[in-house]
Amino acid sequence: MRQLLNKALSSADGGEVYKRDIQSTSVDIKLGKLKDIKSEKKREVSLRLTKNGLMGTSVSTSLEDDTLVDRALIALENQKSHAVDFPNELPRMVFSFSPEVDQLSTEDLTKMAFDLSDRLKEKAPEIPTGVRVHKNIKRVSLLNSAGFNETYDYSNLSLSINTLTDKGFMGVSKEYSSGKVPEITDGGLDRLIHRHHLGNKKITMENEKMPVIFSGNVMGALMLRVIGGVNGGNVLKGTSPLKDKIEEKLFSEKITIRDDGKMAFGVNTCLFDDEGTPSKNTLLYEKGVLKNYLVNIEQGKKLNQEPTGNALKRTLFSKEIEDTPSVFDTNLIIEGDHREDELIVKDIKRGLLITGVMGAHTGNINRGDFSLNISSGYLIENGELQGQVKGAMIAGNIYDLFQNVEAIGTHYEVMRSIFYHMGYSPMVLFKEASIVGK
């Protein structure tokens, strides 16, 4: 990396070399039989150069690629991207890597998948199921001309379980994801089986306003809008409604939201972001009051805020090396005055538990609008789940919906939005939302 940077600096004012080594293995079990095993190993390299106030970028799969510097200079001359400052702030240690996960062999992952499949079969032999285990190991290094030279290791193990309907379609699913080996309790499997059986009773709803619970995993669809609002780039462009709203109460006092890149063994824990800013624990909303935006180095200067460590090589649909660092979440955490999940459901006379949605990427995300088809949801009557709701949707705006937060659950689930994990959330009860039925 040093050799490449020195070569780049002979033709540029400043430079940065970013290297990412990735190893991944996945094992898929379907109907109790091995369906597939996939492995991948790759190296990704990105070079950013600054010269005369402009920036150019090139990417490769090798540090020895002789064209990296030339291609970055050509990009600099033709794309006319504004140069950014390279940081040199020493990061503090984070727990992003588990040797236990790293040492899991393909045989270990296969056994883990079969063991989980066997546990499901023992509990409910009549239900067809699928299990997927995915291991991901990364080493990320960043060296820049300002003196920053750091490396960190990352581990993740994700386990996905799903049931299948009589016609072979996806039934009920559950996902676990952590930097360590996630614990899957019998209670979690029992809830999955119970909800699968509820799917045998289909319920059609009319248009109705009612209490609605978003399960922890589905909160990602709403949090995508929260992130769009606090994104410093969107604030500066005026596409977010939150300009000049710091210290204003915008949500219910019953909810607190933070973004914690330093969370021990979180799904997106990192020592530093893809610009070299150390990871941080940023309070976004405290009891409903907006406290901070998420910003990169340049946005922080314009908004008079320290960079938050959220500049990541990511888009809404990918995490590729060629992606320009943009502001995204690390580990979003939803907190509040917690109430037991069972009590939240039990106290509802008539309402809806939503455990799956489609259309998270549609609508004006940055303004907070959503229109979500309910792919998996359950009608609640007198504190009991009655059956699975089909053909319904929920629509609105988060700046209205989040004023109606009534309760925060206790059991945290990994949130997913589109193709990536966002962090962790318990179930959240909104005291009223509009359901569009048949």
Image (cartoon, rainbow, N blue to C red):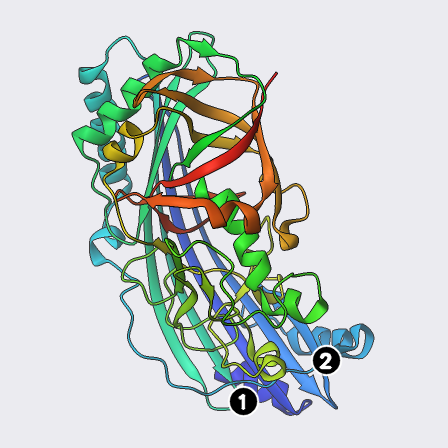
The percent coordinates of residue 389 (x first, y second) are: 47, 18
Q: Which residue matches tag 2? A: 82
**In which image quadrant can residue 268 be found?**
bottom left
- 3D distance between C-alphas at marks 2 and 1: 17 Å
User: Which of the pair 163/376 is nearer the observer?
Assistant: 376
Seen at 53% across and 61% down, the residue is 328
177 above or below 271? above
* Residue at 71% across, 68% down: 237
Q: Secondary structure at mark 2?
A: strand
Would you say residue 332 is visible in this rendering? Answer: no
Relative side of 154 to 105, left or right: right
Tag 1 residue: 145
Residue lying at 29% horizontally and 43% vertically, measured from the top left: 409
Near-viewer residue (373 or 414): 373
Q: Quadrant of residue 253?
A: bottom left
Question: Between 263 and 9, which is closer to the camera in this rendering?
Answer: 263
Helix, strand or loop for disc 1:
loop
**Which percent across, then down, holds residue 358?**
56, 32
Q: Answer yes or no: is residue 208 visible.
A: yes
Mark closer to the observer (2, 1): 2
What amino acid is at disc 1?
Ser
**The C terminus, quarter of image:** top right
For badge 2, the amino acid type reads His
Say which label, 2 or 1, has the lower sequence index.
2
Q: How many marks?
A: 2
Query: On screen, 42 above or below 204?
Result: below
